[in-house]
C-alpha cells in the first residue's frame, strides 16, 4: 500500500481552471471518499492521481516520491470505473488475468491470484462466463477482481456503483467495505452520493468548485460542518435553512421570535444576518411554540414519515419516526432543541460557534 499526497495541485483547460490548489494526504491503508456536486472537480482530481490527466501545477506523491511524470502503469494503481470496462469476448477469468498475462507473470502465479480474488468476491461460480451473461452486480465484482489481482499500492474508484439499482448499490457498498477491511489497500473513492461516502469512508473530502471545503470523518462532517455548503451536502434528506438575525446578542428568527430557541452569539455585531440550520431528523412536531407550517407532502416509508411543509414561504423537510397521519394542508408547528441547531453567517456561510459532541447510544451489554 502507498500513502498519497497532493501538494497545491491545480488543473486548467486553457483559461478555465477546474482544480484550484488542492492539498490532501491519504494515509497508507486509508479509505478516503471525494464527494461533491457534478462539476466540482472530483473525477478530474482522481484522473490526475491515476495519470490519466496531466497536472497543470503542483505535485502528486506516492510514498514521498513525485509521480507527476509517470504513466498509469508505472504508478502501481488499479482503477475501477462505473462502466466496468470488461472485454465482451473474454470470460471472467480471462478478463481478470489479462493485465497479469501482459505483464509476463508466470501462469501458476496468475492462477493463484485470480482464484484468491474470486474467493474474496464470491464469484467462483461465474469464472467461465462472459460479461453478457452477468448481472450488473456480477460485472462490478469482476471489475473489482481485475483490480485486486494486480496487488496495487492504491485503489481508485470512479463512481463504481452509479449504474446499479438501489438494492444492488446497498449490497455492493457492504461488499466494498468488507473487501477493504480484508485487504486494507489505500483507496480513493469518488462519488456524488454522500450516503455512499458516509458508509464507506474513513474520511471524506468535500469538494466545491475545484476546492476542498472540509476534510474529516463522516461523523465530524455531519456534526460539525465548517460552512453552510458542507452542512447542506452531508446528510439525507438535506439540512433545512431558516433566515435569522442577531438581536441583543442572540440569534433569533424574526418572523416568529418564539418559534425556535434564541442562541447566544456575543461575538457577532448587532443586526448580523444569520441562517439557522435544521436537520430534518432533528425536528419534531409540537403544540407549543414552534415554526408555523402548512403540510404540502407526506411520504410514508414504514419506519419513518417524511413531511415536506411550507414555512415562511419556503420548503422544509421533517423526518419523524414511525407513521404519523397527516395530509396536505394540515397546519402544524415544528420545533427543535437548541443543541440540535446549527448556525451560519448569511454573508459567507461560515459556521458560528461549536456544537456539542453527538449523542451516542450506549452499547447493549
Image (cartoon, grey):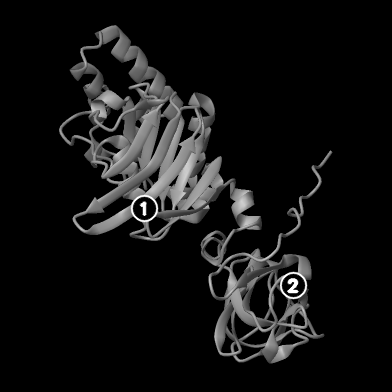
Residue 228's spot in the image, x, y percent?
Answer: 55, 66
Q: For the residues labelled 2 and 1, say whether their Cβ atoms are less than 8 Å apart.
A: no
Q: Is residue 12 left or right of residue 222?
A: left
Q: Earlier in the sequence, mark 2 or mark 1?
A: 1
Residue 211 is drawn in which quadrant?
bottom left
Q: Secondary structure at mark 1?
A: strand
Foreground residue among 44 and 364: 44
Label 2 – label 1 distance at C-alpha: 33 Å
At 24% from the left edge and 42% from the top edge, which residue is drawn? 53
At 27% from the left edge and 45% from the top edge, which residue is drawn? 83
At 54% from the left edge and 43% from the top edge, which residue is drawn? 203
Q: Is residue 54 left or right of residue 24?
A: left
The residue under label 1 is 20
Foreground residue among 21 and 145: 21
For disc 2, the neighbor class at 10 Å (few under 14, some 14 to 19, many from 20) is: some
Q: Is residue 40 left or right of residue 91?
A: right
The residue under label 2 is 265
Say above or below: 364 vs 314. above
Quadrant where the image shows the C terminus: top right
For disc 1, the neighbor class at 10 Å (few under 14, some 14 to 19, many from 20) is: some
Residue 33's tag is none
Foreground residue among 97 and 251: 251
Q: Is residue 124 left or right of residue 239?
A: left
Quadrant where the image shows the N terminus: top left
At 76% from the left edge and 57% from the top edge, which residue is drawn? 356
Amino acid at each position: 500500500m502507498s500513502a498519497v499526497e497532493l501538494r497545491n495541485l491545480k488543473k486548467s483547460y486553457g483559461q478555465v481552471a477546474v482544480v484550484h490548489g488542492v492539498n490532501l494526504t491519504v494515509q497508507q491503508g486509508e479509505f478516503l471518499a471525494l464527494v461533491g456536486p457534478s462539476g466540482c472537480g472530483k473525477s478530474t482530481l482522481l484522473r490526475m492521481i491515476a495519470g490519466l490527466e496531466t497536472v497543470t501545477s503542483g505535485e502528486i506523491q506516492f510514498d514521498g516520491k513525485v509521480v507527476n511524470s509517470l504513466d498509469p502503469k508505472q504508478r502501481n494503481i488499479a482503477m475501477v470505473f462505473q462502466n466496468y470496462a470488461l472485454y465482451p469476448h473474454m470470460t471472467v477469468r480471462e478478463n481478470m488475468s489479462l493485465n497479469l498475462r501482459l505483464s509476463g507473470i508466470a501462469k501458476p502465479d496468475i492462477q493463484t491470484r485470480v482464484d484468491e480474488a474470486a474467493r474474496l468476491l464470491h464469484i467462483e461460480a461465474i469464472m467461465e462466463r462472459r460479461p453478457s451473461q452477468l448481472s450488473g452486480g456480477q460485472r462490478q465484482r469482476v471489475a473489482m477482481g481485475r483490480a485486486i489481482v494486480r496487488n496495487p499500492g492504491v485503489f481508485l474508484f470512479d463512481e463504481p456503483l452509479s449504474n446499479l439499482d438501489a438494492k444492488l448499490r446497498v449490497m455492493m457498498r457492504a461488499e466494498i467495505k468488507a473487501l477493504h477491511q480484508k485487504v486494507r489497500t489505500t483507496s480513493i473513492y469518488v462519488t456524488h452520493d454522500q450516503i455512499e461516502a458516509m458508509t464507506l469512508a474513513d474520511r471524506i473530502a468535500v469538494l466545491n468548485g475545484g476546492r476542498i471545503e472540509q476534510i474529516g470523518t463522516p461523523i465530524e462532517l455531519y456534526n460539525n460542518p465548517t460552512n453552510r455548503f458542507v452542512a447542506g451536502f452531508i446528510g439525507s434528506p438535506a439540512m433545512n435553512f431558516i433566515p435569522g438575525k442577531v438581536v441583543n446578542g442572540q440569534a433569533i428568527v424574526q418572523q416568529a421570535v418564539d418559534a425556535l430557541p434564541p442562541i447566544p452569539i456575543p461575538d457577532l455585531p448587532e443586526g448580523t444576518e444569520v441562517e439557522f440550520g435544521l436537520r430534518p431528523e432533528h425536528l419534531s412536531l409540537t403544540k407549543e411554540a414552534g415554526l408555523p407550517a402548512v403540510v404540502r407532502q407526506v411520504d410514508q416509508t414504514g419506519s419513518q414519515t417524511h413531511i415536506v411543509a411550507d414555512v415562511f414561504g419556503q420548503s422544509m423537510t421533517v423526518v419523524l419516526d414511525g407513521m404519523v397521519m397527516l395530509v396536505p394542508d394540515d397546519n402544524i408547528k415544528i420545533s427543535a432543541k437548541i443543541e440540535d441547531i446549527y448556525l451560519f453567517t448569511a454573508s459567507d456561510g461560515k459556521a458560528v460557534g461549536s456544537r456539542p459532541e453527538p449523542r451516542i447510544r450506549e452499547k447493549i451489554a
